[in-house]
Amino acid sequence: MRVLHVIPSLSLEHGGPTRALAMMERALTAEGVTVETATSDDDGPQGRLNRPLAVPVPENGVVRRYFPRRTVFYKASPALGRWLADHVRDYDLVHIHALFSYSSIAAARAARRAGVPYVLRPLGTLARYGVTQRRPWLKRASLVLFEGPALRGAAAVHFTSEEERIEAEAWGIPMRSRVLPLGVEPLAATDDTLVRRQFPALGEGPYLLYLSRLDPKKNLEGLLDAWALVAPQCPAVQLLVAGGGEPGYAAALRARAAALGVSTRVVWPGPIDGEIKASALAGAQAFVLPSFSENFGIAAAEALMAGLPCVLGRGVAIAAEVEAAGAGWVTLPDAQHVAEALRQALAMNSDQRTAMARAARDLADRRFSAQAMGRGLVALYREILGV
């Protein structure tokens, strides 16, 4: 089976989508699927990825092809569109990631014309929050003219949570919905030595960990406001806010922390990955993601796999499962409710912490492992292809 994945960008700036695609590539390869990926050379605010263009690039155990991005808006890449039109017949199936982007519409159109079945993963773009927050009039028009036909023509629309499916189907577009959670891989066992050495402002006391992109939908303003309520009651605790984002927005967050009087109680390491990320997860008291909207919450799933109790906003799609498993707390987005959840996380005794860590790992192993994702995707592909 030969499968082509198409995604607008593999920039690390896009965090969750990039990590999810990389894990899909590895999980499918482990199941014996030949995987290739086509994308643009977009690298977010940084500009362009330094990759050879329009040629096979061995990465992550698969072949990737990068094509020049002509515009930042919709990440238009006519070269990618032409390549898809010429080569989509070379594949048994196409798995398209995201909507409201050039690559998604070009891939869906090329697949339909060639008679190649495709799976479309909206990446949370059909959540009401996403449709109504940025360029809502343009997105509604695009939904009618472009996304609607792409969704109706898909052999399956891949949602990563039941909550994402329900929100998407509320738009009234006929589609063949399937729910398959994303999978994450366990990080190598470690401790917090490396992260504390790298960021000495953490000190030696407990810390709470936010590890995701810096973006308004993550409700970082609510988190900082909540931390201003909690920090005076726990002077030994720090808040580690790890992630990259638009520089102006990141600066505004730091200014907000200063205005709230907690600038010395928040550590801003920027994006972290690899060993430092594993170390940060290993040492945290709890993981915090109070987002307004997350179609899945891959950062939360990684925290669960590391055995971290989670404080999640009600808009995080896997929040209800986390709460039901006894692996964390679910909160409304306002500062008072987030603060109360943080207090509960910091009040855990060692026995409670051990029990919640076990519940977190059990949930991640059962529902969010890379192996389960790989098997689920292969089963879906075979069903579509009739093999």
Image: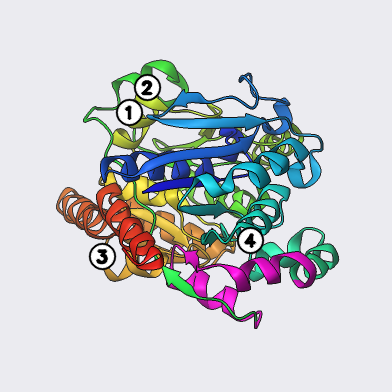
Instruction: Classify mark 1: residues with Cα within 10 Å, few (<14), some (14-19) or many (20+).
Output: many
Depth check, mark 4 against mark 2: the one in front is: 4
Q: Determine the residue positioned at 69% across, 56% down.
A: 105
Q: Are marks 4 and 1 in contact (CB under 8 Å)?
A: no
Q: CA distance from mark 4 to mark 2?
A: 37 Å
Q: CA distance from mark 1 to mark 2?
A: 9 Å
Residue 289 percent location from the top left of the image? 48, 52
Instruction: Look at the image and tell me whether residue 303 can be seen.
Output: yes
Which residue position is annotated with label 1? 279
Label 3 sits on residue = 326
Label 2 vs label 3, nearer the camera: 3
Asked whether the beta carbons under mark 1 and mark 2 sit within 8 Å of each other, the answer is yes
| Mark sitting earlier along the chain (4/1) | 4
* Image quarter of the C terminus: bottom left
Q: Amino acid at mark 2?
A: Arg
Magenta stretch: give its range: 144-172
Question: Which of disc 2 and disc 1 is earlier in sequence?
Answer: 2
Color encoding of the figure: rainbow
